[in-house]
Image (spheres, coloured by chain):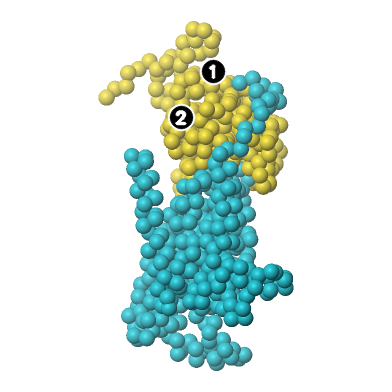
Chain colours: A yellow, B cyan
Amino acid sequence: MLQANSLTYRIGPKGLLQNVSLTARPGEVLAIVGANGAGKSTLLKVLSGDLKPSAGEVVFEGKPLAQWPPAALARRRAVLTQQHTLALAFQVRELALLGRYPYFGGQPTAHDHAVVAAALDLVGLRQLAEREYPTLSGGEQQRAQLARVLAQVWEAEKGFLLLDEPLTGLDLRHQHHTLAVARQLARRGFGVIAVLHDLNLAAQYADQVLMLHQGRPVASGTPAEVLTPDYIQLGFGIEVELLAHPSLGGPLIVPTVNMPF
Amino acid sequence: MSALTEKPAITLTPAAPPTRQKRARVLLALLAAGLAVAVLVGAGAGALPVPVASVLGVLGHKLGLTTGWAFEPQQEAVVWAIRLPRVVLAVLVGAALGLSGAAMQGLFRNPLADPSLLGISAGASLAAVAVIVLEEKVLKLVSALPGSAGAGAYVLPLAAFAGACATTLFVYRVSRQGGRVLVSTMLLVGIATNGLAGAVTGLFTYAATDAQLRSITFWGLGSLGGANWPAIATLLPFVAGPLLWLPRLGKSLNLLALGEEQAAHLGLPVARVKWQVIGLTTLAVGASVALVGTIGFLGFLVPHVLRLLAGPDHRFILPASALGGALVLLLADTLARTAVAPAELPIGILTALLGAPVFLWIVLKKATKTA
């Protein structure tokens, strides 16, 4: 379980996050949604420990995040950030193998190689395993990084996955595929926290949704509770209508206004 | 996709080791073998050529082994007292510079980084030039210290070493903001420090006499001519630590390629790794520059070529850069002292003269390939 208690994060007098709390449970996908600049990525950085909150604390499995030994934390929890810098021209396989570094000392074992191969299979990059990372397309790079993160917590019990906009640059099929992977991990007992832009995808795949607006929580709860026209008007400043999804039964969020210019 | 529903079912046979790794292993073996050959050839080459068999005989004799290889006393004197110290010095300094360059490039995630970029070499040069110009005053000061008889010979290397360490500390402290050292800031501070040290060095050069100018020029071009066993005994404690420890940081530097935050999420103690790399390279480079002057291009060229040959994995690049640096410097020095015998080319000229065109060729070849 990952808990955030009244997180506040400030740079100077500017509050980027104000009093945000959340509970992410094993077996659930939690989506963080909100307009550009609402504080989604900042929240994920505080949750992952990249940023220290000005007030409040993050508790992972009953222990404050700061007290976790880095190596133990790395075997339980993986983080996929938004920027994918990779300074060296690693091959896709070598990149995914970085996810196994917390597990082997000198040389990777056959098991590590097998996990990497399975993770590459899962994201559909097996054929590109020998390709150098800089030669991949943006979406393929994103999937290669996902494979690395998956390899890192492949066998973890009640592992956690923190994903900051994991769908950037992905085509329609791979957007759904990535979230389906997240769902399956949740079924296996993982907790998944993902920053998402597409409200329809959040509605379809998340168990819980937290909506932020200007650093403050607007609403949190099930998708049906949070993704209402009123809250979306509040959080995104746009009018929407909910239609019934023709085949899946859930809601379909459709904007109803043309933008005035 | 069903692989994730229960426990991960890994039914795949492990992949064969990638070709790149195989190539890296072969390359490491070749470098080691090449270095061994270069040592034997280097110890034999010179005004009095000594055949490889005799060099082996001398080595065996000194190690207390009886070998079948015959040698004459004169050969023993030349090989043991003159050539071998120089060969060993070239190997140690070359390994230190190659390894430090590779480690710095890994830490700064920049293939252009090298110890001179942080100002380490410039700081050492400044201190050395200052000592040359202020010679009399400094020596008077030193000889005034109790128990310092004969310390004069060590003043220059000690000053250079202290200059290197002081510069690194300065750069590190200035780059510290809110308890964190930002690597990008550190690069910028290093560039500024380079300029500053260069300017002050220029000031000393301006004030120098003609004789001092000659020493400054000579020192700046680098030379292994001062090699003898005591010099090596002085160098060894400083480079042994870095040479043994830096190659163990391969995994850490690989993780750093993802950026500091992602590396931390994979369990890497980022701050500790930074300190280790910076501290160890300063030791190695400072001690090397102190003994042989500044030798350009080596720490930058060797890792670059190796990366092109067998990929960027630091578990390979670090040991290979140590071996490669040693090999290149040893070959260059052997050439430097035999090409225009009995005179001697400054080694710094030779490494840059050979290194720069090779590097240009690589860059252009790569550019046409991607274009």
> From where the camera sits, is residue A184 visible?
yes
Looking at the image, is B21 positioned above or below residue B113? above
Spot occupied by residue A149 in the image (x, y as percentages of width and height): 58, 35
**Kind of residue at disc 2:** Gly
Q: Which residue is mark 2?
A: A139
Looking at the image, is B114 positioned above or below residue B339? above
Q: For the point 51% across and 45% down, which residue is it?
A: B311
Disc 2 is attached to a residue of which chain? A
Crowding around mark 1 (Cα neighbors within 10 Å: few <14, some 14 to 19, many 20+) is some
Disc 1 is attached to a residue of which chain? A
- Residue reaching furthest left? A261
Q: Earlier in the sequence, mark 1 or mark 2?
A: 2
Q: Is residue B339 left or right of residue A251?
A: left
Spot occupied by residue B229 in the image (x, y as percentages of width and height): 60, 77
Question: What whole-number distance in Å separates the C-alpha atoms at marks 1 and 2?
Answer: 22 Å
Instruction: Give the camera-side residue of B20 and A230.
Output: B20
Q: Which residue is mark 1?
A: A204
